[in-house]
Image (tube, helix red, strand yellow):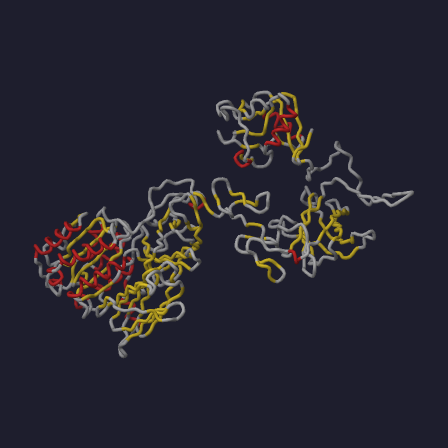
Amino acid sequence: MFQVEGRCYRFYATPSSWDQAKALCAVENSILVTIFDQGIEDYLYYNAGPNTFWTGANDKNASGVFVWDQGDNSPLPVSQTKFTNWGNGQPNINAGQCVTDNKNDHWMVSDCNAMNAFACVKHVYDADFNPTESSTTKIDPGYWKVNVKTYTGACAMTITTQSAIQVYPGYTRNIHDDFGYVAPLSGNLSNYIIAHATGVSSFGGDNAGSLQYAHMYSSNKAQTMMQVEKLYPRDLETCKHQFVSDAFTCPSLLYQTMFTGVDRFGYAFQRINPTLCYNEANMTCANGGVFYDNKCICPPNWGGEYCSFPFCVNGHLAANLVTCDCEDNLFEGQFCEIARCINGTSNLQPDTNQNKTFILILDGSFTNGMEIVLNNLQATLQSILTTAATAQPGWFVNYIGVIAYDSAYNKTVSGRIEETDRTNFINNIVAAVTSTNYQSAQTSRALFTALTIALASPNVNHRSQAYILSAANAEDYQLLNPSLDIVAYSHTAINTVFIGDQNAPGNSTYIDPHVDSLHELSVLSGGGFYQVNATQLQQFWLNQIVSVFNSYGIVFNAYHNCSSHTSYIQLDGNTNKLILDIFSMVSISINLYDSNGSPVTISNPAKTLTNYLYVISSSNGNTFAAGIYQLTITSINFKEHPFCTVNVKGISSVSTYIAYNQDIGFANGQHSNSATYYPKVAPDYNVAVVYSPVPLQFYQAFNNSGGLLWASPLLPRSNCVYNYVTKDTFQCPDASYGIAIEGNDNDGHPFRRTEIVHCLGKQHAVVMENQPHSFAALSRKNK
């Protein structure tokens, strides 16, 4: 038998199978050898000579996955030991399942039934050793007396014992700590002893010993007892150190601590440990910790007396006590906080602001101002789409149009016009609408029917833009919910542009469902609601369409009166344009203040009698300063304050893209690379996955009133298309709802993005008068 690195090794020359060798090692409370490094290998070769011997390595549980047998404990993967010594052409999994070793051939896979010598290993000291009648004779319990007589000179005597009862003390200034340090702090600082004791528990479960006192003696010849501290039991479910003392201060810099207690048979015992106190003036907080109130205040993910212990989120503290060992192949990062994608196959790349579809739903009647629009449609569309293509190349790659008529016409809608060339699209839709020269006596059109036909095209790309251009309202408003169901498949934003801003669309009222339904459609899809004079259409539309490219939501508020309101706008450090999109039935004054309370110059809005559209650039021409901005709106009309809506968006150089995953069977989908653009209805559970170039913390879902429906932390990931995933799963809380993701930009400023989400397969059941932002609900509050 010989010792290496604190372990005992013993060779057995008796030829045995692998299972026989394992059983013979177990008789000695040992296991077949585990080879951690070259030093152990060299010792084994030196003692084995030319002989071949069994090791603990095998792949019995999974072919090709070799582990070190650890007896009653879980096997240790060979990959975790970071050392291998395979022979030529090894491992050959066809040769067997057990591994032999010798200095000539090194590690070889062999038949487990082959007969070989073997080597066993165990720790030098076995703290769980329990003497039996056949083993070494036990010393009788009780008090023993030793007399020492000298004839000349001084002498010293040390008495030691080998026992299952061992005391391992630690010191801390936090009574709830379970790590501890090797020494307490000197001075007038309070310390606690936390102690782990082996061999005091009852094997039968009926009785248990305990530590009772810590006696502190001076280290001089007199060995005077300076103080005594009582020890108390702790919660064994949560604490590895079973005992904790009262608070104490160091009686001196160096002293002896004698722990006394009672074993499980009721006999007293004592154990003595030398104790050295550290001077608190020499204490330095590590890893960004701050020394305050005589202790270290640690930053996130660090703990311990000196902030030197990392909190390993998905792993355990390494043997060096300063780094983390992460779960094999599942996590990485300094604190094992980053999940790795190892399963799921998805070709779904993060969405971009390119390759979208332009959709036009066109009122086909040459009446009520639409005759001006239709007679100039060629020039208007040419200007709008050319500007979009020039300003943002690659934005729109296909075009879809449907003309809406009404129930009095021989067909309520036209066929679908689809083109990938914008010039062909413009020519075809202009030709289709002018060929009929339809002049309706009705004030409503089949706008929802036309929209559903357009959205049913397989060529509608994700998060496209649709425009309803009409002088009439919707005769088929009852199709609001089915239309939203179809919107869910593409998350297209529906922008409603009514011709005429003197009265409500179709000369009706705003609370008329023929009108209100289109407003709700715009709000619930993330679009806009506009009224514009026919002669202003082209210029207003030019301003509007460039404002929606790559924009993100910040604030949407609906007010039952527009007397005076303040909206708070949180900007990160990457926003280069701010968009104020306001609908109001009366004239209002608008003021914007930056995070310092200073006015921000805003001017030259695209303006109608009902709409204000500002596209604001920063004063320095780059990005806005990060912070909380204030937007105030005040009615200029002193007699009437009808309802209004405020929609604030931003345009940023930093884009985030959200998707969803239903592959959650393993670890709530943290390690799955699968993704779809939409959440799915129950019984499916979903996780949200997000691509973001800046750090994120939270994902939140809100109802139409802004109430929180669900929230989850966002966890970072690597080796994934989407580098964040919600910690928790969810089922769709509603057919449509708002979401927000929050984090920090690269300079540490708060970062927030909002958008509308539709749940695939969940039917909408919108009751307009119950929607908090509907014109009907806002009008009721204003009475």
Q: Is residue 58 left or right of residue 128?
A: left
Residue nearest the viewer, comparing 674 with 372: 372
Instruction: Name the residue: 58% across, 50% down.
Output: 309
Return the x and y of residue 120 as percentages of the image width and height. Answer: 64, 29
The answer to which quarter of the image holds residue 699 is bottom left
Residue nearest the viewer, comparing 250 with 618: 618
- In the figure, 751 relative to 333: above or below? below
Is residue 522 among the parts visible in the rendering? yes
Instruction: Name the residue: 80% across, 43% down.
Output: 158
Quadrant into which the C terminus falls: bottom left
Residue nearest the viewer, comparing 650 with 142: 650
Q: Residue furthest front?
A: 620
Q: Residue furthest right?
A: 151
Q: How many marks?
A: 0
Is residue 213 among the parts visible in the rendering? no
Q: Residue furthest bottom?
A: 639
Return the x and y of residue 712 as percentages of the image width and height. Answer: 43, 54
Return the x and y of residue 758 as percentages of the image width and height. Answer: 31, 53
Q: Is residue 8 left or right of residue 227?
A: left
Residue nearest the viewer, comparing 50 with 644: 50
- In the figure, 503 relative to 518: above or below? below
Q: Is residue 284 left or right of residue 525?
A: right
Return the x and y of residue 769 as percentages of the image width and height. Answer: 28, 65
- In the figure, 128 relative to 229: above or below? above
